[in-house]
Image (cartoon, helix red, strand yellow):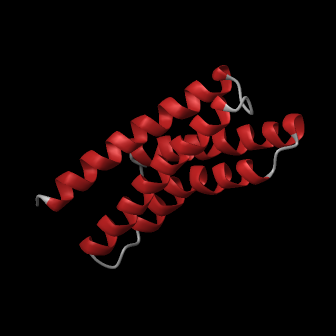
Amino acid sequence: MKESPLLIKSFKLSVMVVKLCQKINSEKREFTLSRQLLRSGTNPGAMMREANKAESTADFIHKMKIAEKEAYETQYWLELMVETDIISEQDFKPVYDLTIEISKMLSSAITTLKNK
């Protein structure tokens, strides 16, 4: 079974976030904020995978909305970390840009499903 571009991108986001958090932990010894980023940044992919086994269309939409909210929360933690010099702009930009892309894709998918 071929995975959707959204699932592929969300898994890529999870990998990027895990690696970034490992870097933050080892270089900055910052664990509290990195734990928040790790939780929110890996959740969109997990929720989308879970949505694929949803019990109904409403359940599917609900899980996709949670994924969208978690991607948005990830943006917050990334913004906070770059503004407080926990991460560099170089580390921030690719992860942040991917969260924006995923958020837009999720929003579009949710809108399409709601209008059916």
Extreme top residue here? 90
**Image quadrant occupied by the N terminus:** bottom left
Extreme bottom residue here? 55
- Tell me where residue 61 sits by quadrant: bottom left
Q: Nearer the viewer, residue 31 or 48?
A: 31
Residue at 56% across / 42% down in the picture? 13
Q: Nearer the viewer, residue 81 or 11?
A: 81
Is residue 30 in view?
Answer: yes
Q: Nearer the viewer, residue 78 or 60?
A: 78
Residue 109 in the image: x percent, y percent? Answer: 26, 50
Up the image or down, 115 lies above or below 27; here it is: below
Up the image or down, 54 lies above or below 105; here it is: below
Is residue 52 in view?
Answer: no
Residue at 33% across / 42% down in the picture? 105
Residue at 40% across / 35% down in the picture? 101
Q: Is residue 116 left or right of residue 31?
A: left
Q: Is residue 36 left or right of residue 104?
A: right
Residue at 61% across / 47% down in the picture? 14
Residue 72 in the image: x percent, y percent? Answer: 45, 47
Extreme front residue here? 84
Q: Is residue 84 left or right of residue 78?
A: right
Up the image or down, 115 lies above or below 17; here it is: below
**Image quadrant occupied by the C terminus:** bottom left
